[in-house]
Image (tube, rainbow, N blue to C red):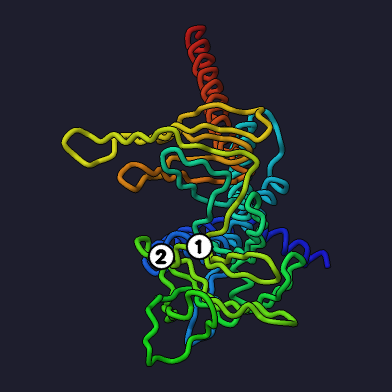
Amino acid sequence: MKTILRDIRDFCVSLKLTVALLVLGMLLVFAATLDQTNLGIWGIQQKWFRSFVVFQDVRGVGLPIYPGGYLIGGLLLINLVAAHIDRFKFNWRKAGIFLTHAGLILLLVGELLSGLWQEDFNMRLSNGDTKNYAESYRFNELAITDTTDPSFDDVVTIPETLLARHESVQHPKLPFRVVIKAYYPNSLLQMRAADGPPSLATAGLGLGIVAAPQPVTYKQDESNTPTAYVEFTAPDASPGTFLVSTGLVEPQRFNYAGRSWKITLRAKRIYRPFSLTLLKFNHDSYAGTDIPKNFSSRIRITTPDGRDDREVLIYMNNPLRYAGLTFYQAGFENNDRTTILQVVRNPSWVLPYVACSLMALGLLGQFGIHLVGFVQKRRAKSFVAAVA
């Protein structure tokens, strides 16, 4: 038993393991860069860096081909901590080394927490628009809204993951069951031919539109159009089967059980207890070119209780941090009348700054300690030579 424990310890503190992990990390970055043309940035992060093992589809079978970023980073973290515990004895002359390694450990932990907790959304605001929600870049949801009360919308949302698994949903607020008949991660919407095959839809826009499944795209300049056929079933009369898609601009409406409803497949929303209003968007270019020099958004922040009502300016490299969210100036559209804000929720955003500060302080401290020692030795030699 002692031999096994000693072998495990030797493996964890091994310098060879450190070198091997660093080499694997470099190869990981290289392979992920080559694969970026196939999967795009988001796909690469999930497949190569935010996974324990990288799987590759070979003839319909997912085979493990490489250790992922979590596995390499986790082993490197264990190796670093174990080496410190086993080999290093703290003294003030090595304080810089300890601070540098502490910063590196914190940097690895921060990346892990960012991968687990970070969420990215966007908010599009035209001049004068007010919103209290942001929309996801990658995830969608089926929204079923009770619009009977003109002053209040009661919304039930079903995440896209349930649509993809064709799961049925019976929500307490809904007088019918939601049954997913079909789901396409990407599709092409076409007008239905009169002599074409029958549509899965029995109500709404799906009577005149059909969805043709398409391969999922990961290119930066292309987007997917998820589509689903959703049936609402009830013990008495069924409202029918509807085609819902992110490619449809307007929601579809119907009446059931004496109430008015609307349904839409939309980007996932994150609501917050405050609102942003775009007062003015500015876009400056370099003279004689279309190259952006600066673009900024003057925003008003308001809360329902009136405790916060102020104006802020968001521009490049100057984000707004508010209520646990960070708002970056990301882009613009609609002939400079619409601003696009990137909204990031990352509870661990401060860790990389602390980690880099610790590493810089540790390196400066260690260099300073050796510099002082070197100067003292030179002075001692000079004094001895002068006396002699």
- Residue 295 located left or right of residue 182: left
Q: Choose the circle earlier in sequence order: 2 or 1.
A: 1
Query: Residue 37, position in %: x, y?
Result: 36, 66
Label drawn at residue 370: none
Q: Which residue is mark 2?
A: 223
Q: Residue at x 67, y 62 (%)?
A: 156
Q: Residue at x 62, y 70 (%)?
A: 255
Q: Nearer the viewer, residue 50 or 218?
A: 218
In the picture as drawn, the residue positioned furthest to the right comes out as: 1
- Residue 251 located left or right of residue 329: right
Q: Residue at x 45, y 38 (%)?
A: 128
Query: Residue 205, position in %: x, y?
Result: 47, 74
- Residue 203 located left or right of residue 211: right
Q: Is residue 337 above or below residue 263?
A: above
Q: Residue at x 68, y 42 (%)?
A: 88
Q: Amino acid at mark 2?
A: Ser
> What crowding class fits label 1: few (fewer than 14 Cα within 10 Å), some (14-19), or many (20 or more)?
some
Label drawn at residue 24: 1
